[in-house]
Amino acid sequence: MKKYLYKHKIKLSILTVLLVWYALCLPDKLFDVPYSTVIESKDGRLLDAHIARDEQWRFPAVDSVPYRYKQSLLQYEDAHFYDHPGFNPVSIAKAMVDNISAGKVVRGGSTITQQVIRLSRKQERKYYEKFIELIWATRLELRHSKEEIIELYASHAPYGGNVIGLDMAAWRYFGRKPHELNWAESATLAVLPNAPGLVYPGKRESLLKEKRDQVLLKLKEENIISETDYELAISENVPIHDFRVPQLAPHLLQRANKEYGTQKLRTSIDYEMQETVNRIVKNHHNILKQNGVNNLAMLVLDVETQTVAAYVGNAPTTREHSKDVDIITAPRSTGSVLKPFLYAAMLDDGELLPHSLVKDTPTIIDGFSTENYDKRYTGAIPASRALSRSLNVPAVLMLREHTVPRFYNKLQQLKLSHLNRCAGTYGLSLIIGGGESSLWDMSRAYLGMAKTLELYTENSSQYDPEIMNRLSYLDGNSAFAKAEQKSTSEQINWSLEPSIYGAGSIYHTFEAMKKVNRPQGEEIWHFFNPDREIAWKTGTSFGNRDAWAIGVTPKYVIGVWTGNADGEGRAQMTGIDSAAPVLFDLFNRLPTQQWFAPPYDDMIEVQTCEQSGYLATPLCESINQYIPAVGEKFDSCPYHKTVHLDATRTYQVNADCEPASQIVTQPWFSLPPVMSYYYARSNPSYRTLPDYREDCIPASEDVMRFIMPKHNTTITLTKNVDGELNSAIFEIAHKKNDVEVFWYMDNEFLGATKNFHEIAIEGKKGKRLITAVDEDGNDTKIYVMFE
């Protein structure tokens, strides 16, 4: 009895061990292999793919198997697939009889399930291994559904060469997705895994066609396809060449691989748009490289969905010129592309009105000197025109008024990730390219402004507080995109207050950016279509190292960068000449559309001075204008004042020298001396104030002032090619016309000027007193340091 119980326990233990082994024999991850990274357009078309690490083209596992392929596979490999538990005893017995009779292997008895196990184990074909495959196959049947097993097979079966899986095979041999294949094509792919080395497209086509036609015949005999379908299918040729994987977005593929790993990703890319942008970039790169400009990036964003419609990270240049570098994400000097954000910020804070005059004169602030690109000055210019002409001096003076820390904090809200040093390290140069950002971040910031304006008018004048920072290159229906959207916010918490910029300020910023008033020599009429409403901005960094152009419409935001990845500058490379033509090459191909609706709920109608753009006073001619609501706290016009003239209206007088009955009083638009000096040059209709009559000059009248340089400026003496010291230019503005001014350095007479008071002075090292005296004895003085 004890012996019996002992044997029973041993059998039970062995059975328990076998059951445990059986339960655990199948690995949790059946296929531990590397996959390719694959990106598709928003409509599912293949854009680009990386080969897997093991040099196999193995796309990520399929999530469904097309009906035609499935039926072809079952008829060829395993007609009783849905009836057996993982192995088919009848098929195994028939295979053994046929193989023994033939003296060699002429038939296999493996089911699709067994083949999945064989593909995962990759062991030598021995009888012991066949037994293991059979056991594992039954275990696989318990863990997965029949459909999942077919998906595993289709995803990991070899299809010839280094092609693994149905998705890649369908593309390689037919240039289409598996669900788009017809019966003949599906039957061809069903045949290939059985002997991928022997039956290969382009070789032994007759054998491949014979095997394919056998499958088609079975399909007809089983009434799966009709006689007509059969006749049409066998009349087709088998593939005789393969299709190359498209390379429409290599830099986006590189980025997707880095951020999401080896996945198949459905992106937001518009396939036709991507092809168009690729052609545009290639064409313009061929032009630009003749001037030594070797790199070009272009990004197209869809405003409605806040997604990427086209992504070209670099021109098709050479490895020597860094063709693999994704310029879209690289930090580059911003040039002038930040200016619209300062303009909008000051409108938002009531520090500016859309067309209020801003100063435009030679400027040195705490040793920081700036000048306009064309080295010309207007004296005073409407803020909107200063933005459209991208003038540096007004921008720097506006930033000084707004302050660098406040503007820097605003940019931090925009999440411009490469502006990562403290505000003080940038200083006033921040607005003219002293900081860096990427084409991705800058385009996203402009996109946020456009989307804010669009949603404001569509959602009862409310704001989405997170709208400025959303941008994705994934299709909204993809799993990753849905996860990101869910983690960002389950529901929009609308607000009556903007998180960064108000709709009214954005609208006026875009209106200013629509203007095409450009400095002489920068006209772009030859590629700009005046019928299209586009808000756009160019930028050129110091040394002509970076050229930018960013354009906005209610449908798209397009960003362009041109330059050299290694930072080499080119003299002729500017935003207007190099990047803007690329921008408009695409914009001019797009359909026209209605412009943004004015956000009246965020604006107020006021009277502004027609000449100065400030809030109107009784002294100036006014016009009605909608401005951001906060603008009503802005200043009234400071440039219109009441002047007192003699009866002939020739001279200014006052009550000390003229009877009150003879004084004519009238309003006059008058700018401060330096502003007036330059303003008169660029505005022929501007009338300077009449001089005071000689017997009426006030004692405190400031009649002359230095324009450049400023008091206590340090001037570095440079030498010309002959080794001689270059001269420094000194300039003053004088209120009187046709007056002579005498110049002195220390006590040394230098010369005289008339009408235009500008003189070149050969400096001597050390601190020098420069004096200018007019013929009436008025003088002005400054100290400068020559070194």
Image: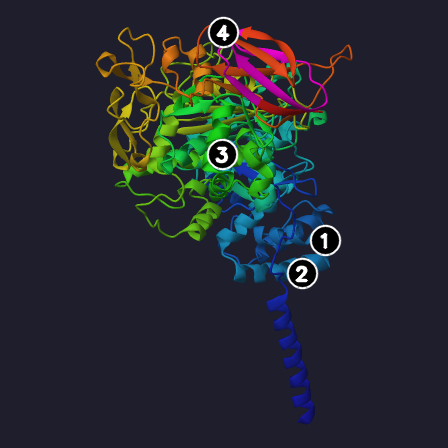
How far apart are the two marked residues, 2 and 3, measured between alpha carbons?
A: 79 Å
Q: What type is the residue that disc 2 sits on?
A: Ile
Residue that extends furthest to the right in the rendered view of this protein: 723
Badge 1 crowding class, 10 Å Cα cut-off, few under 14, some 14 to 19, many 20 or more, is few
Residue 565 is drawn in which quadrant? top right
Q: Mark 3 points at which residue?
A: 400
Tag on residue 755?
A: 4
Q: Nearer the viewer, residue 221 or 268?
A: 268
Residue 179: x and y, percent? 47, 37
At label 4, counting other C-alpha atoms closer than 10 Å, the crowd grade (few under 14, some 14-19, many 20 or more) is few
The image quadrant where one finds the C terminus is: top right
Q: Is mark 2 on a helix, strand or loop?
A: helix
Q: Earlier in the sequence, mark 4 or mark 1?
A: 1
Q: Which of marks 2 and 3 is nearer the N terminus?
A: 2
Q: Is mark 4 on a helix, strand or loop?
A: loop
Viewer-side residue, 178 vs 136: 178
Part of the protein shown in magenta = 754-781
Of labels 2 and 4, the one closer to you: 4
User: Is disc 2 surrounded by few (<14), some (14 to 19) or many (20+) residues within 10 Å?
Assistant: some
Closer to viewer: mark 1 or mark 3: 3
Q: In this view, does 600 lie above or below 143?
A: above
Label 2–label 1 contact, CB within 8 A = yes
Name the residue nearer the viewer: 683 or 171: 683
Question: Does the magenta portion include 777?
Answer: yes
The answer to whether marks 1 and 3 mark residues whose Cβ atoms lie closer than 8 Å is no
Q: What residue sits right under mark 1 in the picture? A: 123
Q: Mark 2 points at which residue?
A: 132
Residue 43 x %, y % = 44, 34
Q: Which quadrant of the structure image shows residue 57? A: top right
Q: Which of marks 4 and 3 is nearer the N terminus?
A: 3
